Amino acid sequence: MFHPDSFGYRPGRSAVDAVGRCRERCWSNDWVIDLDIRKFFDSVPWRLIVKAVEANTDQPWVILYVKRWLAAPLQRSDGSRVERDRGTPQGSAVSPVLANLFLHYAFDTWMTRRFPSVPFERYVDDVVVHCRSEAQARLVAAARSMVGGCGRSVSVGVMCTCQ
């Protein structure tokens, strides 16, 4: 179901595999863009996560538990609770799974439709995009704010040549 270039928190795939694929692609693509979705785990809208889950299950209990889990308050070390209205709790076992599911639609599918000839590697919310020319890299970098129409702020950490 997931894009073949999605590596984060998937069985039989690792960050080392993503780096290996990245190294291979640097030999045939002169430009790379390092993308990071700012504060992804803190700010992803719940309705979009739930929409991604609904697209993959018809089990009402799964959707109910995802909604409950997302809305659970954050408990601080002093015992106080903080209500949340977006984001996923970092450090939990479910957050990376939901992040991958959401970004499968918001980034991978979007990128495949918008730039079908541009390869990338994604490890949860970190992405390396490979471009053949500076012009193509600038075009992809300029479109980053449109990532799947999900309203996430995407920063370009580095845009450089591999030569």
Image (cartoon, helix red, strand yellow):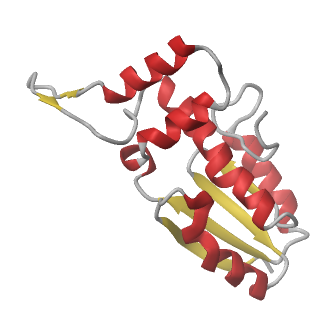
Drawn side of residue 36 relative to residue 7, left or right = left
Q: Residue 111, how many percent across, how many down?
A: 73, 60
**Looking at the image, residue 25 lies above or below residue 13:** below
Q: Residue furthest right?
A: 28
Q: Residue at x 53, y 60 (%)?
A: 36
Number of marks present in the image shown? 0
Quarter of the C terminus within the rendering: bottom right
Residue 30: image quadrant is: bottom right
Q: Residue at x 29, y 24 (%)?
A: 72
Residue 25: image quadrant is: bottom right
Q: Residue 117, how many percent across, how many down?
A: 88, 66
Drawn side of residue 36 relative to residue 16, left or right = left
Q: Residue at x 73, y 51 (%)?
A: 109
Quarter of the N terminus within the rendering: top right
**Quick check: can you spot residue 4?**
yes
**Quick check: can you spot residue 123?**
no
Q: Residue 16, how many percent across, how many down?
A: 72, 42
Drawn side of residue 116 relative to residue 73, left or right = right
Q: Residue at x 70, y 36 (%)?
A: 14
Depth order, front residue of 101/136:
101
Depth order, front residue of 153/7:
153
Depth order, front residue of 22/33:
33
Residue 149: image quadrant is: bottom right
Q: Residue furthest bottom?
A: 135
**Looking at the image, residue 45 lies above or below residue 81:** below
Drawn side of residue 123 relative to residue 161, left or right = left
Q: Residue 100, how many percent across, how many down?
A: 61, 38
Depth order, front residue of 74/57:
57
